[in-house]
Image: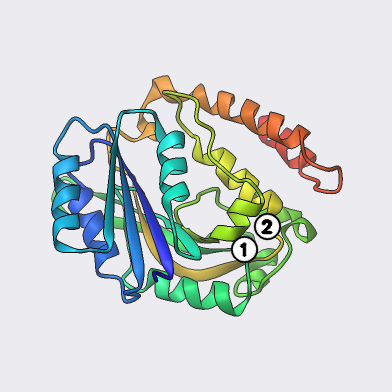
Amino acid sequence: MAKVSVVIPVYNVERYLQQCLDSVQNQTLKDIEVICVDDGSTDSSGTILDSYAKNDSRFRIIHKKNEGYGNTMNVGIGTATAPYIGIVESDDFIAPDMYENMLAFIQDKQADMVKSDFFEFYVNEDGYCIKEYVPVISAGNMQGLYGKAFHIREHEEAFYFQKFNWNGLYDRMFLKRAHIAHNETPGASYQDNGFWFQTFTLAERAVFLDKPLYMNRRDNPLSSVHCQDKVYTSCEEYDYIRQWVKQLPEKQKCHEYLCSEGR
C-alpha cells in the first residue's frame, strides 16, 4: 500500500508537465501513488499523463470535463488511498527527497500536517533558472518553531506564515474528519486559499521544516497570478472563507485574523 498519495491538478501545462511528473516519479520514497486529475485540457497534457501511467503503475489518471481548480482538487483528494496526501502543481517540481523527509516528520511528530520552505524560480531569456529561497517562517522571533509540533491556535502568528498548500503533507484522516475541502465555484481562482485557511484553523499539531523541498514556478503566463481578470475572484474566495468561519465554534478563534486579511 502507498504511504503517500500525490495529487497533481492538470490543465493545459504541456510545456512544464514532464519536469513536474519526473520529479514526482523519481522520489526517494517509492511507496507513493500519483493521482493526476486532468481538468479537460485541450493541449497534449492528457496524452503526456497517459504515457506515464502506461509505464508506471503508481500513476492513476483521471480525465474529466473542465470544472475548475476546486473541483479538480476535491476529486483528486477524494480518490486518494494513502494515509498522507501531498499536492504538486503541474507547472512546479519537487526535491527528490521531499516526501521521504516530510513523511518522517509527520509520523514522528504525529502531526496533522507538515510544511516546508521552498524556492520561487523562473527561467530567464538565456535559459538559466533563477531561484529565490522563501522561508515559511520569516519572523525571527518565530523561527524557533521550526521542527517542533505545535497547536496552531496557541501560536496565532502562524496565520501570517506563507499561505500555500503545495509545500505540505497532510494526514488524510485529519482532512476527512474535519471535512476540509476546496471551494468549487466554477471558473474561479485562488481556491487554494480556503483549503489553506481550513487546515491552519483546524490542525491540532503542525510542523514546519527549514528545508527548501519545493520549486514554485513564477514564469507561467497562464498562472492566476498573471491574469488580471482573476484578481477579484480572491474576494469571492474570502467570502467563502467568512461563511465557513461563521460555522466554527467560538473556541476556534480566527476571526481577528480574517478581519485583518480583509483590510
Q: Is residue 74 left or right of residue 30?
A: right
Q: Is residue 153 left or right of residue 182?
A: right
Label 1: which secondary element: loop
Are the residues flagged by discs 1 and 2 in contact, CB closer than 8 Å?
A: yes
Q: Is residue 233 left or right of residue 130?
A: right
Label 2: which secondary element: loop
Q: Quadrant of the N terminus?
A: bottom left
Residue 138 visible here: no
Q: How many marks?
A: 2
Q: Is residue 210 above or below residue 121?
A: below
Residue 129 image label: none
Q: Is residue 33 above or below residue 79?
A: below
Question: According to the image, label 1 marks what residue?
Answer: 112
> Around disc 1, counting alpha carbons within 10 Å, would you say few (fewer than 14), some (14 to 19), or many (20 or more)?
many
Residue 151 occupies quadrant: bottom right
The x and y percentages for residue 87 are 42, 54
> Around disc 2, counting alpha carbons within 10 Å, would you say few (fewer than 14), some (14 to 19), or many (20 or more)?
many
Question: According to the image, label 2 marks what residue?
Answer: 203
